[in-house]
Image: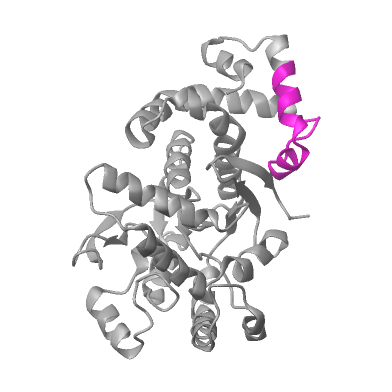
Amino acid sequence: MNLWLSEILTMDVIDTTWLQQARSAMLADQLRAKAFGITLKNIDAVIQKRSHLLKSIWPAFRQFCQTSLLMPPQDMLTVLWDLWLPLAIKIASHRQKLGRPIVQGILGGQGTGKTTMSQVLNLILQQLGYRTLSLSLDDLYKTYSDRLTLTQQNPRLIWRGPPGTHDIDLGLNVLNQIRQRQSPVIVPRFDKSAYNGAGDRTTPEIIADIDIVLFEGWFVGVRPIDPEVFNSAPPPIITDEDRVFARDLNQQLNNYLPLWERLDNLILLYPTDYRCSLAWRKQAEQQMITAGKSGMTESQVEEFVNYFWRSLHPELFIKPLVKSSSAIDLVIEVNADHTFGAVYSNLI
């Protein structure tokens, strides 16, 4: 944590020394400054707005860190200042300019922090006066019985998650209602623990006056690619059967394009090495086992993660998006230790 940053929490009036430190720190990372629209001309106004918001959100954020993240809030202060606050302000500004409810997409694989980011953004946006809905791609899964039928038709779909296991019309209906200012809206929810972990729909939520939807998922916004690419795909797409499976799911992505058209913006949480998700999942399962809960063994985790890499390989589907200004509005790199790295926008 930057020592100068913690001082703002007890400072009634921003002094000249602190202001200069803040200016230097925020302008030092040129890519991040550009991504959040920070310039020499507006830097002081940005600091004033962000510091005021930090103080107002701090009590709720502190409680969130202690109860949900189980870590000292001071440890997350830099991330809050450098990333989550400016990101929330950016989203709120876009909502204000459009003058209607917006759908903010968040794309990220396992362990990239999609859920945590959505929760923190929800806290901040509420403080800014916006009614926010967190919606996961998981909430749009087909029912348990429908997925049983699907597995009978296509035995390769051994786990929920890949393209084809979601009710796209359900998602379109919800997002269309919100964008058209209908209120209240019946929001689907999914219980992953139902049927011994197979999961099923649970009681939906009825939510009114939604301003901003934070729509997150492991392939939210991902589009189909040239099928020829699979001829020389990386492992674990190795066998002819693997390539057929990958091509079939690539074709399934076409059905999701109408859903992606409802996105107003798309953020990519991008691991510097996609293989980190395997290590992260192993850590998570080990923590569950240590806590006395049921968890997968290392070999089961490898089988599970490889299944999703065969479905939509990150090197083929995610990596090309990093430099695509037409698909991604903001890229947030995630390091192997879960810290955030470079933040940049490809928009001109």
On the image, the x and y values in percent for residue 35 come to 70, 44
**Image check: 230 left or right of 54?**
right
**Residue 152 among magenta residues:** no
Q: Which of 295 and 270 is in front in this view?
A: 295
Quadrant assignment, res 298: bottom left
Height in image: 234 above or below 206?
below
- The residue depicted at 46 percent of the width and 50 percent of the height is 280
- The residue depicted at 49 percent of the width and 87 percent of the height is 241
On the image, the x and y values in percent for residue 271 come to 59, 52
Height in image: 336 above or below 11?
below
Q: Nearer the viewer, residue 116 or 94?
A: 116
- The residue depicted at 60 percent of the width and 70 percent of the height is 317
- The residue depicted at 71 percent of the width and 51 percent of the height is 345
Quadrant assignment, res 173: bottom left
**Image check: 139 left or right of 176?**
left
**What is the span of residues highlighted in magenta in the rendered image?**
20-41
Q: Nearer the viewer, residue 129 or 47?
A: 47
On the image, the x and y values in percent for residue 108 come to 52, 57
**Image check: 141 left or right of 268?**
left
Quadrant assignment, res 147: bottom left
| Image quadrant where one finds the C terminus | bottom right
Secondary structure mostly seen in magenta is: helix
Height in image: 26 above or below 295?
above
Q: Seen from this angle, which residue lies furthest front? A: 299
